Structures are given as C-alpha cells and as structure tokens.
Image: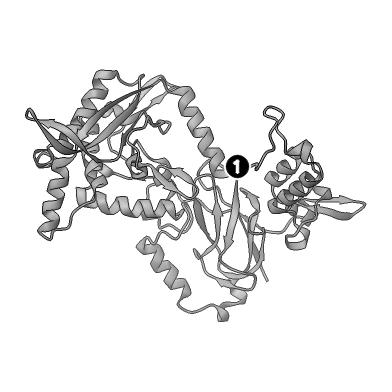
Amino acid sequence: MSTQIFTLPDLGEGLTEAEVVRWLVAVGDVVVVDQPVVEVETAKSIVEVPSPYAGRVSELHGEQGAAIDVGRPLISIDAAGSHESSIPADAGERHREEERAGSGNVLIGYGTPESAGSGRRRRPRAIESSPPVAATQGIAATGGQPVARVTSPLVRRRAREAGLSVREITGTGTDGLVTRRDVEAAIDAAGADSTERTNRSERTGLDVAQRIPLTGFRKAVSTALSRSRSEIPEATVWVDVDFTELFAIRAAAQAAGKSVPGLLAYLARFTVAGLRAHPELNGEVDTVNDELVQYAGINLGLAVQTDRGLLAPSVLDAHLLTTMELDGEIRRLTAAARDGRATQAELTGGTFTINNYGGFNVDGSAAIINHPQVAILGFGRVIDRAWVVDGELAVRKIAQMSFVFDHRVCDGGTAAGFMRVVADAIESPGSAIAHL
C-alpha cells in the first residue's frame, strides 16, 4: 500500500503558515483528486484546500485550531489503487466537470485547468516516505520519552511570551498535541494564581479585562495600515454631492418595472469614469525604481466590513463591465468576502478602492489608503438637507464625498478634477450615463 503525504501548499500570500479551521474529511473517508479536504485561515481569508491525490484518508496532520507551516504534512492518503472498488464511479468525473466549469472549489495552482489562466501551474510537493515522528510532529523528548508535542511555532511563541514552557502544558489534541487553546488555558490558569502580576497595567494601575493576541488577520491589517500611514504622504479633500437626480432616475425605473442596479453600482461606474479621466490615480508608486506606475485596466476595490474585520476585495476588470454587471459582481463579491470565500486575486489585486462608510450611518471620514494603491474614495450617508437650487431653498438628498490621495502622485488640482468627474455624474446622471 502506497501512502502519499500532501503538504500545506504556498497559498500565494507570502505567508508561512495557516490555521486549520475545519476538516472536511475524516480518517477512513475516500477522496478524489481536487476534492476539498480542509478549510484553513490565512491572514486574508478562509481557503478550501483541495487534495491532489485520490484514495483513502489515513491521517490528518493537525487539530482544528492548530497552525501548520507551509511545506509541513497536512493530510496522508493511501493510494487509490488499493481502494478503487470503494470509490464512487462518478466521483472523479464529477470533480473534473466542476473543474472544467470553473466551480471555484480549487486552490490557486491546484486542480485548475491550464487554460484557466496564464500562470504556471504549480505541482504540490509529496513526501515519499514519512520522516521520524519527532521530526514531523515537533516532539520534545527526555530520556527517549515524549513530554510535549507541538506542531505550531505560533503555539511555542505564545507560550514563551507568557513565560510558560510547553513541556509543562497538558495537550488536549491528538496524541497529546499542545494546541493554541491549551496554551491560552494555561495562561488563564497562571493568571488566576498571580492576578496582580499578569493582569494589572503598570501604566494605568487598572486591571486588564482582556488580552487579545494580535495575530492572523488583525496582525496583517495592522501591518498594512501602519505601512500606509508611514509611507504615503496623503492629503484629503471633500465635497457635498446632490444625489437627488440619481435617486429619481432609479425610482422611475423601478416604477416602470425595470431591473435597477444598486446605488453602489452607479458610484462604481462613475468612479471608473473618473479614473479614466485621471489615470495617474489608478496605479502605485514603485519606490525601488522611482517610478509612478499606471495600470491599463481597473480592479475596483470595495471596503467590506466582515466578522473578521475590514476587507477590500476588488471587482476585477471593472472597466469592462456595464452598470448592471457591476451590480451583480459587487453583490457576489461582498457576500464572498463576508463568507471568507473571496479569491486571492480579488483580495490583493485592487488598483483603487471605494469606501461606502455611509452604511454605518456616518457623514464623513478620512480613510486610510489601501497600500500600495495611491487613493481611496469615500461616501457618507445620503440624508435630506436644505439646499439652494437655482436661487431657491429646497430639500435635496445630500451626501459628503471624501477623497484621500497620495501627494507624490498628484496635486490638489488633479484630485479636485477627479472628484468633479464623479460628483458631476452623480448630480446629472442622465447626461453622464449617455457618455459612459
């Protein structure tokens, strides 16, 4: 019987590890090529990892909640040749059909048809024979007897930072595996014995109610935002925009029984028009070569609030989509981001970002640029306000639009020009749409 060991692949984010969220198979299950076997969480999203092998699962290398390093064993599968009779006849063909149809149930670089993209297809690494258990599972031994089993460097570091030794922690995972939850429990237990030492702030003199490790997603967000603030000399401008006519056009179309795009789809369409008029805002600064990079196409990012924090997935090739197509893609992308299903390209390929903070019922914001992009456009809530129109006072639907830009790329004149393209389209949507 031949056993193939699938190691955690490079997920394409420059990360060195991922946390096991949920196993989709169990020991003894029969799997086929490209069948998702586990959900893992990276700094940016939750990803389903498909198996490159067919056969019967013989071992899962990691408890749920444990972190696994890239290149370390993820799952062991006994070769399908020994179990062909137990594999459903249509299973392999079903997954191949999903693959050909672009089901999205495969990880980048694995199980994707070569015609699906121009990138080079990567092959997963397999370990022909299992190395000694102590080497693969991180067992510390004394006198030949294992005293601690830890797979994750994160777990070791967390224990070390808390002043604890993993050798003194009882593991609740498989075969005594010490998981992150075990370390946190040990930290809590230690805190209960020495509250004054561990839970009181020396600076404030107050008890600390909770300590939340800045790891994974939150750590990545913190790093990105800090980098944006430290590297980009940003400036902010804003203007009040009259949405009355845009609301009227949408209401008239709805009354006529027509399918109407959402408000954000119109804002996306007008933003694309603004970027076409001012392409320097659709790019980035190459500090290595001292160049201002401008992109030929537009991947329009959208700030999306999720349970895991703020994400900015992008509508790829937004410049090629109609307003109605933008509406459908925005709805799909928003749902995917909140479910942790946005693709790597969607999460990292944006060239410009829209932030609809009006959804939080606030009027204005000076947003932080999504590095390495050079600008971000924000919209506050639309409210009824007293407004002067043709010399007379009227009630109009007004919202504040703010624009934060990298001053290395343009000056205030260009920023104002871009904003007026978007604002004028919102205020006179009929004439604007005719020219888009």
- Tell me the quarter of the image containing the C terminus: top left
Give the residue type that dot 1 points to: Thr
Image location of residue 114, percent across then percent down: 40, 54
Image location of residue 71, percent across then percent down: 62, 49
Image point 43% across, 31% down: which residue? Answer: 371
Left or right relative to 116: residue 328? left
Where, by quadrant of the figure, is residue 376 drawn?
A: top left
Front residue of 299/111: it is: 299
Number of numbered labels in the structure image: 1
Left or right relative to 278: residue 208? right
Crowd tier of the residue under label 1, counting other residues whose Cα lies within 10 Å: few below 14, some 14–19, many 20 or above: few
Front residue of 267/359: it is: 359
Image point 39% across, 40% down: which residue? Answer: 349
Q: Is residue 294 visible?
A: no
Front residue of 333/7: it is: 333
SS at circle 1: loop
Image location of residue 401, percent across then percent down: 27, 33
Front residue of 158/135: it is: 158
Residue that sits furthest to the bottom in the current view: 85
- Residue marked by disc 1: 215
Where, by quadrant of the figure, is residue 1 drawn?
A: bottom right
In the rendered image, the vertical position of residue 57 relative to residue 355, given as above or below: below
In the rendered image, the vertical position of residue 408 relative to residue 101, given as above or below: above
The colouring scheme, among rainbow, by chain, secondary structure or one colour, is one colour
Q: Is residue 103 visible?
A: yes
Image location of residue 216, percent across then percent down: 57, 44
